[in-house]
Image: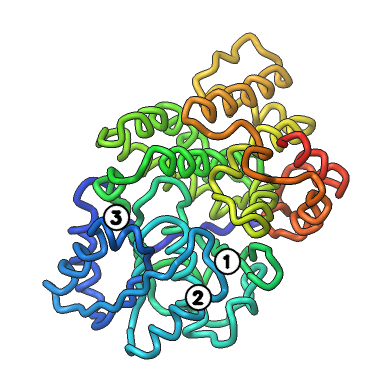
């Protein structure tokens, strides 16, 4: 079966990436940007720095800073109204996954019409979105370079998975200098999100040699650098290596898709408004315990790339070693012990499981689960 590989046409990575990207943006001859971001980035001055750089090359900016940590349909609609009122001709997302996803929603509806709710699913849109430049400030979600857009529908209390080639940005930017100001807790959560992307892509039924190579290298870089990035936020090398790691993980899952970790984490985020990376981190070992029934060799590879000596281990032992290594890394960066500490209640699990089984991310999990099995995985994580 033929495989497709999606990635932005231009990607700028490493120290000084923002300045390099400004020249690329100028060359595209845009006139007025809608900058989609959040209030904390405005407060610490990163947004103003970007506005000044754009102004120096003759590009005007309008700021939409109303993005919530789990962006909503309402956020998309508010940003779209601002875009239209100011006659913007392209969109810049500045931040982590939430601004990127919100910006994708705005840009997609700007050219396709209707509501972002109309595009839930896989490749539903007909037209390319308005040009989007995604400037990343976290090392985790990889939303700056993927075709995934996750938007919370407030009316249904669920996260919609919009997987669409037309949400791919035209330019992605990863500059580790923008990541140094991120707090340890956010660095940890986004780093574990990247690890989840890599592992789920590696065990996915849609994996191929290209995504495998990206996923395994990402796992190695995360194992080697996440703790350092969390404990010493100003460690430029660790930040840069994590930027590359999350990008590689993005390349992997953007093309091999994901699994039940994300399908289940989306429900926790939509139902309880919980941080996505933390939910992923807590669910990851429990879902892989389930997956070990069918892909122990793949999980043994994960253990090896997490620096575990698996030479004397069977596939099944290697899989358990991977699960143990995931838990150890999660604990080392301060992730909470279980979902109970996040306020998740057992009485809500049947509803969460119902919605998780409908999430497109679960379709490529290596073993398809029953409702009862999804409920049990949730319970194991409590």
Q: Where is residue 379 in the image (x, y as percent from the top left)?
A: 78, 38
Q: Which residue is located at x 62 percent, y 75 percent? A: 119
The nearer-to-camera label among 1 and 3 is 1
| Image point (49%, 64%), residue name | 101
Tag 1's secondary structure?
strand
The answer to whether the residue labelled 2 contacts the one labelled 3, judged by CB atoms less than 8 Å apart, is: no
Q: Residue at x 21, y 69 (%)?
A: 51
Q: Do the residues labelled 2 and 1 touch (CB within 8 Å)?
A: yes
Q: Give the distance between the C-alpha atoms of the residues marked 2 and 3, in whole angstroms.
A: 26 Å
Asked if labels 3 and 1 touch by Cβ distance under 8 angstroms, the answer is no
312 in relation to 349, above or below: above
Q: How crowded is mark 2: few (under 14 residues within 10 Å), some or many (20 or more)?
A: many
> 366 or 118: which is nearer to us?
118
Task: Name which of mark 1 and mark 3 comes first in the sequence.
Answer: 3
Q: Is mark 2 on a helix, strand or loop?
A: helix
Q: Return the disc, 2 or 3, that comes first in the chain's sequence.
A: 3
* Residue 373, position as x, y percentages in the image: 84, 42
The x and y percentages for residue 310 are: 60, 15
x then y, percent, for residue 369: 82, 46
Alpha-carbon distance for marks 2 and 1? 9 Å
Q: What element carries label 3?
A: strand
Q: Name the residue under label 3.
A: 12
Q: Mark 2 points at which residue?
A: 76
Residue denoted by label 1: 151
In the image, residue 187 sits, relative to residue 162, either above or below, namely: above
- Assign the C terminus to one quadrant of the image: top right
From mark 1 to mark 3, how far is it between C-alphas? Answer: 26 Å
Q: Which residue lies furthest to the top in this view?
A: 312
């Amino acid at each position: 079966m033929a495989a497709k590989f999606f990635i932005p046409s231009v990607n700028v990575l490493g120290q000084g990436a923002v300045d390099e990207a400004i020249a690329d943006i100028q060359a595209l001859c845009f006139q007025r940007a809608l900058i989609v971001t959040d209030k904390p980035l405005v407060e610490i001055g990163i947004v103003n720095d970007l506005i000044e750089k754009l102004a120096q090359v003759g590009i005007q900016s309008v700021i939409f800073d109303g993005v919530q940590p789990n962006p909503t349909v309402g956020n998309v609609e508010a940003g779209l109204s601002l875009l239209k009122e100011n006659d913007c001709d392209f969109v810049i997302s500045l931040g982590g996954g939430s601004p990127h996803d919100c910006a994708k929603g705005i840009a997609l509806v700007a050219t396709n019409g209707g509501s972002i709710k109309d595009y839930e699913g896989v490749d539903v849109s007909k037209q390319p979105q308005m040009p989007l430049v995604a400037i990343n400030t976290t090392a985790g979600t990889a939303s700056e370079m993927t075709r995934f857009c996750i938007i919370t529908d407030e009316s249904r209390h669920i996260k919609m998975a919009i997987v669409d080639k037309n949400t791919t940005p035209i330019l992605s930017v990863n500059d580790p200098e923008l990541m140094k100001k991120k707090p340890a807790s956010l660095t940890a959560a986004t780093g574990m999100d990247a690890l989840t992307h890599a592992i789920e892509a590696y065990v996915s039924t849609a994996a191929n040699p290209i995504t495998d190579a990206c996923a395994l290298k990402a796992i190695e870089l995360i194992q080697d650098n996440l703790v350092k990035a969390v404990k010493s936020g100003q460690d430029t090398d660790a930040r840069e290596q994590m930027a590359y790691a999350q990008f590689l993980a993005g390349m992997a899952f953007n093309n091999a898709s994901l699994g039940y970790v994300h399908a289940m984490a989306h429900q926790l985020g939509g139902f309880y408004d919980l941080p996505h990376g933390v939910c992923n981190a807590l669910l990851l070992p429990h879902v892989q315990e389930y997956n070990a029934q069918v892909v122990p060799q793949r999980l043994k590879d994960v253990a090896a790339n997490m620096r575990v000596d698996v030479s004397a281990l069977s596939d099944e032992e290697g899989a358990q070693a991977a699960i143990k290594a995931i838990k150890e890394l999660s604990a080392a960066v301060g992730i909470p012990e279980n979902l109970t500490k996040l306020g998740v209640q057992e009485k809500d699990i049947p509803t969460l499981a119902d919605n998780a089984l409908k999430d497109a991310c679960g379709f490529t999990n290596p073993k398809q689960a029953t409702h009862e099995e999804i409920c049990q995985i949730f319970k194991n994580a409590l």
